[in-house]
Amino acid sequence: MLHLTNFEKRYPSGFSVVIPELQLPQGIHVILGGNGSGKSTLLKALAGIHPANGTVVLNGISLFDQPLEYRRKIGFAPAEPTFPEFLNLHDLIAFVAKAKQASIAEISELKAVFDVEDFLSFPIGGYSSGMLKKSALLLAFLGNPELVILDEPFTTIDALTQDQLVNLIKSKTEQGTSFLITSHQRGPIELLPLTSILHMKSGKIQPNG
Amino acid sequence: MGKLAQLAFVRPFFQKTLGFWTLALLIGGVLMEPAQHILIGRFLFKNPLAFWLLPTSIFLYGWIHLRIQLELVRKNEYHVFHQLGLFSPTDFKRFWSQILLLNFSPFLGYFLFLSYFAWEQKAHFLGISLWMLCFAVIFFNFIIIQKTLQQPLKETIIHRPSVRWTFPRFTWIILSIRNHRPILFLLTKAFSLLLLNGFFFSFQSGDYDIRWLQFGVLIVSYVQLPLILEKSDRELTHQSWTLGLPLTLDSKLGYQLGSLALLVFPELLFLVWNRLISSSFEHLLLAILLLSLSCVLQVLVYRKRESSSFPNMAAAMFFGLFLAIIFSLPWWAFVIGISFLFIHQSKRSFGF
């Protein structure tokens, strides 16, 4: 499913994420690691948001050679989502649905899963961190992506939404979607049928990962 | 999508360039008469060297526009707009063409005005070239934005200075304005120095007395109003936490005087420099007059900025000061009055 070769992301500060080789089959993969270990940096690069060096191939499509085709197959929710304050979730869903060509049925299903109907038309500037996280998660699932990358998806959302998210991940996995997840919360992760657990430290995947 | 495009990429652009447009309006709309615009329009197509100002300005504007848009899409909260790269070519064109046309509309409008003079002067080639260049700059902006959104976005990395000085508090405002409103600052300074030069130049003819220069300083102090508004805005938002600190009156006054002196430093330098050349003590006093006028504007902004009467109060004050200058009323008495107001404002909790 996802194949990384000579992946490298360096910052002027000296911090770097280096992964010589990594192959992940279809399924649910979790990356564990302490704060500042490079998990979010890796996920943002794999989501095609920030540039990196090396080769990243998802189901035969290369991130650096065919960035648009690659990004169409990816859904991403950051750990601390932020959106322009003047928008509302309704605008955002319409915008991302247009970019990802999501169907109306899919949008309705996701709205129900994340229970966002009550605050759809509120300006984002007034959202709580939980509302922001729900919004980012909903947007990540739009357009039936082949790989959904979720950075700390279970933080700041309520217990009911956590359960809903676990069920959604399970059902999407059965339909062929893969997941790359980071989490500091063991509870919800233990409910998922994990394919692999990777450990990251100082920007490197540990050999025993 | 039209509303979204305007909120996300048109409004922030005009917000960031607000200072420039305010000055452009002030110069073009207040200080210049329509006859002068017509003269300039004709002159631009008669003089090839002057005509070059137009391509240069559209290039510069296009470059600034591109920089602002790219900075916007690289911001964390704008990452959602990275997905614009996934829009179909038709949707992408539709989305960005309205943004580009709106953001370039002031130039398009002015070029339309100039086209009349190109036709009148029979400078058809120059007129057509100008339009072609304008659309080429817009197209170039479109292509670069499209390419940027199709690729992973370059990260904004904050470079810390290798030498870490401790900046005194009165320098924070000028540093903040330098970082966030450099164009406003530069244009204000350029315009006020141009005005001061003009007043001093005409003063040398010998037809005017010192009141002419005092009037010039009054106008220049009002030109600083956008910067003083920006200063107050930053003090009341980003640096509002300092308002609650248990600072002494000395410290508050020192901060306000220091930050205002830094804000009008180029003009103060100009006035002091002219005193050195002319050896006239009255010229040096003009520097004190400028600083005290800046202080009074600062108090006015703090006390009345939220009020609808603010423009009227500012205009009335200008008129009062103008009369004081004409009738040679002792302005040092006015300075003492301002000092009391300034101290009173500083003594108020959350006053400054």
Image (tube, rainbow, N blue to C red):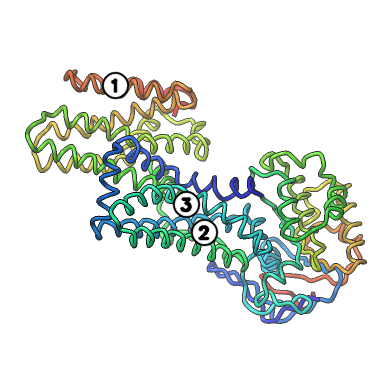
Residues under labels 2 and 1: Cα distance?
46 Å
| Corner quadrant of residue A57 | bottom right
Left or right: residue A190 compared with residue B215? right
Image point (85%, 52%), residue name: A110
Residue B167, visible in the rendered structure: no
Question: Of circles 2 and 3, which is in front?
Answer: 3
Judging by the rendered image, the residue that carries numbered circle 2 is B158
**Image marks 2 and 3: residues in contact by CB distance under 8 Å:** no
Instruction: Name the N-terminal-most of marks 2 and 1.
Output: 2
Q: Describe the element under mark 1 as helix, strand or loop.
A: helix
Q: Nearer the viewer, residue B298 or B23?
A: B23
Q: Chain of mark 2?
A: B
Judging by the rendered image, the residue that carries numbered circle 1 is B319
Image point (25%, 60%), residue name: B48
Judging by the rendered image, the residue that carries numbered circle 3 is B104
Location of residue B185 in the rendering, given as x and y in whole percent from the top left corner:
37, 45
Amino acid type, mark 3:
Phe
Left or right: residue B46 compared with residue B178? left
**Image marks 1 and 3: residues in contact by CB distance under 8 Å:** no
Q: Chain of mark 3?
A: B
Residue B191, visible in the rendered structure: yes
